[in-house]
Amino acid sequence: MAFRAFISVDLPRLELLVALTEELRGTGASLKLVDPDQVHLTLKFLGDTEEALVPRIVEAMRASAAGVAPFTVRIAGTGAFPNLRRMNVLWVGMSGAEPLVQIARGLGAGVEPLGYPREGRDFSPHVTIARVKGGRGQDEARRVLDAHVRDDFGGFAVDRIRLKKSVLTPQGPVYSTVEDVAL
């Protein structure tokens, strides 16, 4: 049986990030906001995954996390992909996330033999907070991002990575942890 999967670092509820999400909601922009209780950093999106591959994926997770001690990151700054003029994804950045780049690189190499291709671009640690669904209110959303471009939304300890299952529902995705790998 297959399920939709990704490997991530879960974020705790950061009230300043919740406030940013509410400020974006208040713009009336055509955005699909990420539920603050489901905010995470995706290290590797896997997509459809056979349950039989889970042990080998977990093995790749352990290998990529080997030698990485728990560390602290800060959630800071705002932006959009591909850029603020043509926004598709709204994000907050991370500082102190260099170990995540190392883990993501290891995951890319570790799951490639299982049929998951490597990304065509370098891993950039960020947290998606919204996806643009239409043109309405983009100028207002841009102003909010500009106003918070240098803000610090808080920090947290990264001490594990998780293999997550994603079930898409009309109300939005529902995530659950399949496996947990400690740093």
Image (cartoon, rainbow, N blue to C red):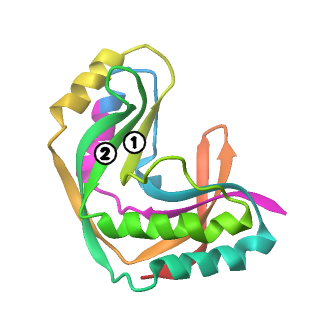
Is 84 located above or below residue 89 in the figure?
above
Residue tagged by mark 2?
A: 92
**Three-letter code for the amino acid on which mark 1 is drawn:** Ile
Residue at position x 45%, y 46% from top?
35
**Residue range of the region highlighted in magenta in the rendering:** 1-23
Question: In front: 5, or 97?
Answer: 97
Residue 147, picture quadrant:
top left
Q: Residue at x 26, y 40 (%)?
A: 78
- How many marks do you count on the picture? 2
> Callout 1: helix, strand or loop?
strand
Residue labelled with disc 1: 129
Q: Amino acid at mark 2?
A: Val
Task: Say left or right for 177 vs 143.
Answer: right
Q: Which mark is residue 65?
A: none
Image spot of residue 40 (x, y percent): 44, 56
Residue at 70 percent across and 68 percent down: it is: 113
* Residue 41 higher or lower than 21, as above or below: below
- Contact, CB < 8 Å: mark 2 with mark 1? yes
Structural distance between the alpha carbons of marks 2 and 1: 7 Å
Name the residue nearer the viewer: 119 or 160: 119
